[in-house]
Image (cartoon, rainbow, N blue to C red):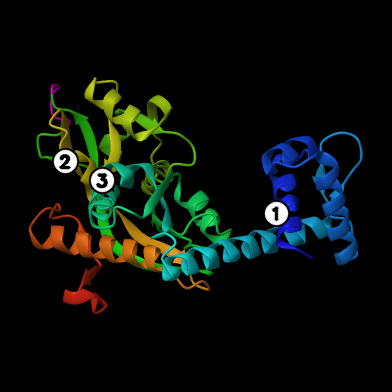
Amino acid sequence: MTLQQLAYFVALADVRSFTRAADQEGVAQPTLSRQLKALEDELGAPLVNRGRGELTLTPAGEAVLPLARRMLSDMDSARTAVAELVGLRRGRVRVGATPSLCIGVVADVLRVFHEQYPDIHLELSENGSQPLARDLARGQLDVAVLVVPREGLDPSLEITPLMRERLSVASPRSGRPPSSRGSMSLTELSRRSLVMFRKGYDLREVTLQAYADAGVTPKFAVEGGEMDAVLRMVEAGTGMAVVPDLVFAGRPRLRRTVLTPPLYRTVALARRADLAPTQATQAFCDTMLSFISEVSATGGLSADVQVLHRWRDGGAGLARD
């Protein structure tokens, strides 16, 4: 068995076509087919069904796929770590983050990190927390900044809680305040039209769960937007939205109204627990933690954002507040 054979198998599993997999891997289709057959002979079972129609994996293929992904990821991490140590290159960090966190804290952390480590290549992937967690487990990301759901995340991931952030109602500042008190309940909000995020967005799931817990039904003006689109539609007066407090910074056209009782979400830093981070990945984690601590200490975060970890001077470690 070779890593190249595993790479061909993973490519085939991803695109479900011998022709496209061969093109993706830069080899002739007969070469890919021969290598896959050699892998199947070594394992003693077929990995793909070769009948007519869409290519599918056999039960053996389904069992081997996550292991193959992890083996390829571990080899890639080994190459990166050794390259850093011998001075071939400074490294790479594949960062995942939810769209709302990209708009808030992650964009600033990436800027600071790039200023400190200009030779480290940064790759950013925006997605919902559950897809990001899956990509971490598969070895397709090195670290992710995500929202911890109620049911928790994959136990194979190491989770470092960063902050507990309040969610508030965004409305257009050009219109009348939704409440004269500066706060409103979910029952009051249910009488207003919402601009709702697309399916798979953490904020959508948190908002809908809060409505269900309150025993009320949401009313939508528009569904299916990304973060930027939702905020622009709110500014234009299309409807209201439930958003993290951090997104209000630098958006003077939005009015913030707090929810009562308050609604929170927990933001965390996640990576694979079974894989030691490369120097570059560890440097990114250190930068994230120190940045949040510094911004919190200087009053740069909303009073409703609770920092769950602070960075000790000199990188000595973490301490829960």
Pick the quarter of the image with the N terminus. Answer: bottom right
Residue 13 shown in magenta:
no
Residue 175 shown in magenta:
yes
Residue that mark 1 sits on = 7
**Cβ–Cβ under 8 Å for marks 3 and 2:** yes
Residue that mark 3 sits on = 104
Number of numbered labels in the structure image? 3
Q: Could you say where residue 38 lies in the image, as x and y percent from the top left?
A: 87, 58
First along the sequence among labels 1 and 2: 1
First along the sequence among labels 3 and 2: 3
Pick the front one: 110 or 267: 110
Which of the labelled discs sits on residue 206, or is there none?
none
Crowding near the residue tagged with mark 1, few <14, some 14–19, many ≥20 C-alpha atoms within 10 Å: some
Q: Could you say where residue 170 lies in the image, as x and y percent from the top left?
A: 23, 35
Q: Could you say where residue 55 lies in the image, as x and y percent from the top left?
A: 82, 40
Left or right of 46 in this view: 255: left
Which of the labelled discs sits on residue 249, or is there none?
2
Say above or below: 4 vs 82.
above
Regarding mark 1 in the picture, which secondary structure is present there?
helix
Asked whether residue 219 is in view, the answer is yes
Which amino acid, mark 2?
Ala
* Residue segment shown in magenta: 174-178
Which amino acid, mark 3?
Gly
Crowding near the residue tagged with mark 3, few <14, some 14–19, many ≥20 C-alpha atoms within 10 Å: some
Camera-side mark, 1 or 2 = 1
Task: Kindly give the residue lying farthest to the bottom in the view shown.
Answer: 316
